[in-house]
Image (cartoon, rainbow, N blue to C red):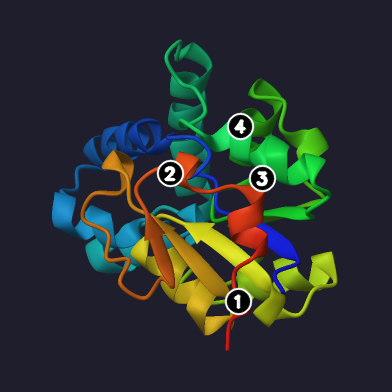
Amino acid sequence: MIRTVIFDMDGVLVDTEPLHRDAFFRHFAELGITVSDAEYATFLGSSTRNMYQRIKREFGLSQDVEALMVRKRELFGAAFDHSTELDLLPGARALVEELYRQGVPLVLASSASKETIARVFKRFELYPYFDHIVSGEDFPQSKPNPAIFLQAAKLAETPAAECVVIEDSSNGVAAAKAAGMYCIGYSSEHSTGQDLHLADLVVSSLSQLDAATIMGLAPAR
């Protein structure tokens, strides 16, 4: 049986992607580089560190990766703090609260930085519902590397095959399957262009999910 639910954050619980995109492209403009929309789409699900490692190599930037990350996060933080429209995605709070009421352990495994996760969790008061939070900044490689999900399972003391991951990106789904976990792909207007064919189940709305459905899923094999 499924024992633990692992959530991605961006694109699943909250849509901060437009804010991230704006911050990245503002920074690209400052750096004087051009990143296509198609190339940017391949970054989704990756950590900021891994993104800038790739960009630094590709464009031969002289700046230190840490400095690049700091500037991007400054731009994102300003946009996040001034946004009046940002909210949890439809169905996200209801699903989290129902799973919590049913005593299902919840873990967040997001490629976002700890700072960004903290901003979201504080703003939307999500801390009480999650047993553990895992940030992609603690891993040398981003999704589709499965390390972040394996760590989430370890913290939850749950075998990987008895975990279910809810993801919206190609990289995230690939990581979940590489970890040996059941994966629900969330195909929404916020995840256009993402290939979710590796997911065991694909939904277009979180309202299609409830505790009974999730806990009744067959463990990954």
Q: Which label sits in the foreground, 4 or 3?
A: 4
Residue 218 disc label: 1
Position of 191 compared to 200: left or right?
left
| Label annotation for residue 11 | 2
Check the image and report above or below for 213 versus 201.
above
CB contact under 8 Å: marks 2 and 1: no
Reading the chain from its start, which is encountered first: label 4 or label 1?
A: 4
Callout 1: helix, strand or loop? loop
Q: Residues within 10 Å of mark 3 (few under 14, many from 20)?
A: some
Front residue of this view, candidates 26 and 111: 111
The residue that mark 3 highlights is 114
Q: CA distance from mark 4 to mark 3?
A: 21 Å
> Looking at the picture, does residue 29 appear above or below residue 82?
below
User: Which one is in front in this view, the residue at disc 4 or the one at disc 1?
Assistant: 1
> What is the number of the mark on residue 113?
none
Quadrant in which the N terminus appears: bottom right
Q: Quadrant of the C terminus?
A: bottom right
Name the amino acid type tagged 2. Gly
Within 10 angstroms of label 2, few (less than 14), some, or many (20 or more) residues? many
